[in-house]
């Protein structure tokens, strides 16, 4: 009997897959582990022409997102979430077993995992202690670097990577590589978006998604914003029909002005709740440090992290452990849930504090 493992690529055999929130724990009562919006989004739509393939790049969606983002339609590509964008960029810019990308942990792991799958070296340069980029180390590793991935706001730390450092890199790599800014959480600090720099820097790429502030994680829709030349090459490589007709219909509804206004109102509400939750957590003596954040989540350093994590899990409160990440040995990431979710979290943290201390 043949062993299928013998014909699997070596780098896939050794691959450590991404552990999504649903893979790790899909059972609980309160989910604060995936940075989702705590409001159920539902819509009844009659879908037509399901026997026909959809438009590969839906013009109506692109037009609406152009109006929303203030980016020219020729600089927008619709993708299956931002994750497809991460993979596509490596495919079109990096030569397997020759070129490399750079990532800066602790950050979103899928940049490196996609590189591993595609046979691309991932040069890992951790953030400095002040959470800034280590520019000196970056410049020592420029050879064969085609892509620099920067998450801004960064997940899981919530901080903004220095704009001056990014512009410095854009200039340094202007002829040799692209700088990719993952703006998955940018709606929570929209004034910090760097999308306006696309016209000035042809090697700048912005990743966006409807999964976070728009609350549409279930439909898997994202966007790549970039120079028209990059968009043209991405269109050569993307799958023939990436966006299903039902997704197109749903996105068209939620990119209308009334729905965008609702999203903006919810963002303001969640930002205020984030500040409140941060202040309340600081009152608990189990909490050693609450990281400042620009996203819809808080990174929290705890005393007795394992006991805290296990206690909350048993109570049905599902959060995301970060203690496997560099410099985050005692940290947990907590999504900003509903007011009741946050109150329940605080209540249970008070209980465990009384049991431990």
Image: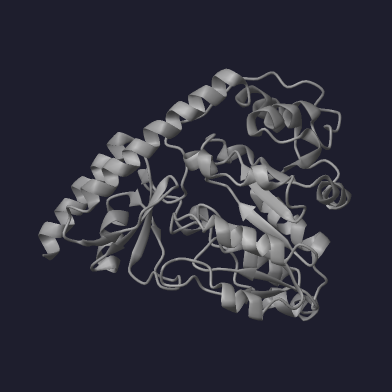
Viewer-side residue, 290 vs 47:
290
Viewer-side residue, 120 vs 247:
120
Number of marks: 0
Above or below, 283 relative to 240: below
Q: Is residue 266 left or right of residue 277?
A: right
The furthest residue to the right:
236
Above or below, 176 relative to 341: below
- Where does the C terminus fall, quadrant-wise? bottom left
Q: Position of residue 12 (x, y in %)?
A: 70, 73
Kindly identify the residue that appears in the image at 25 percent across and 58 percent down: 311
Q: Is residue 121 left or right of residue 40?
A: right
Q: Is residue 348 left or right of residue 87?
A: left
Kindly identify the residue that appears in the image at 81 percent across and 73 percent down: 96
Q: Position of residue 118 (x, y in %)?
A: 76, 69
> Is residue 90 among the parts visible in the rendering?
yes
Q: Is residue 168 left or right of residue 50?
A: left
Name the quadrant containing residue 57. Answer: top right
How has the structure been colored for display? one colour
Above or below, 324 relative to 27: below
Q: Position of residue 63 (x, y in %)?
A: 75, 28
> Is residue 124 among the parts visible in the rendering?
no
Above or below, 193 relative to 59: below
Name the quadrant containing residue 296. Answer: top left
Q: Position of residue 70 (x, y in %)?
A: 67, 32
Kindly identify the residue that appears in the image at 83 percent across and 48 percent down: 239
Viewer-side residue, 89 vs 34:
89
- Where does the N terminus fall, quadrant-wise? bottom right
């Amino acid at each position: 009997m043949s062993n299928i493992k013998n014909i699997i690529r070596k780098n896939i055999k050794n691959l450590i897959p991404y552990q999504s929130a649903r893979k790790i724990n899909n059972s609980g009562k309160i989910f604060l582990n995936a940075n989702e919006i705590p409001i159920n989004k539902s819509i009844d739509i009659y879908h037509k022409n399901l026997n026909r393939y959809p438009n590969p790049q839906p013009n109506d969606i692109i037009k609406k997102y152009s109006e929303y983002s203030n980016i020219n339609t020729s600089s927008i590509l619709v993708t299956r979430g931002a994750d497809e964008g991460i993979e596509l960029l490596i495919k079109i810019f990096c030569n397997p077993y020759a070129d490399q990308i750079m990532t800066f942990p602790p950050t979103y792991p899928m940049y490196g995992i996609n590189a591993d799958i595609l046979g691309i070296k991932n040069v890992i340069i951790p953030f400095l202690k002040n959470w800034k980029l280590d520019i000196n180390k970056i410049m020592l590793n420029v050879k064969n670097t085609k892509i620099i991935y920067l998450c801004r706001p960064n997940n899981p730390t919530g901080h903004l990577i220095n704009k001056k450092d990014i512009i410095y890199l854009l200039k340094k790599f202007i002829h040799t590589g692209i700088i990719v800014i993952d703006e998955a959480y940018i709606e929570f600090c929209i004034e910090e978006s760097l999308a306006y720099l696309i016209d000035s820097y042809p090697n700048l790429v912005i990743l966006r998604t409807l999964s976070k502030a728009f609350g549409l994680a279930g439909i898997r829709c994202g966007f790549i914003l970039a120079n028209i030349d990059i968009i043209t090459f991405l269109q050569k490589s993307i799958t023939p029909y990436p966006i299903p007709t039902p997704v197109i219909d749903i996105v068209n509804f939620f990119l209308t002005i009334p729905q965008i206004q609702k999203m903006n109102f919810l963002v303001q509400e969640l930002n205020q709740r984030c500040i409140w939750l941060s202040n309340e957590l600081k009152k608990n003596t189990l909490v050693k440090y609450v990281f400042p954040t620009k996203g819809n989540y808080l990174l929290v350093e705890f005393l007795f992290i394992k006991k805290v994590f296990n206690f909350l899990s048993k109570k049905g409160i599902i959060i995301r452990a970060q203690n496997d990440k560099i410099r985050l040995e005692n940290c947990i990431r907590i999504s900003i849930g509903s007011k009741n979710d946050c109150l329940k979290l605080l209540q249970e943290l008070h209980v465990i504090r009384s049991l431990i201390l």
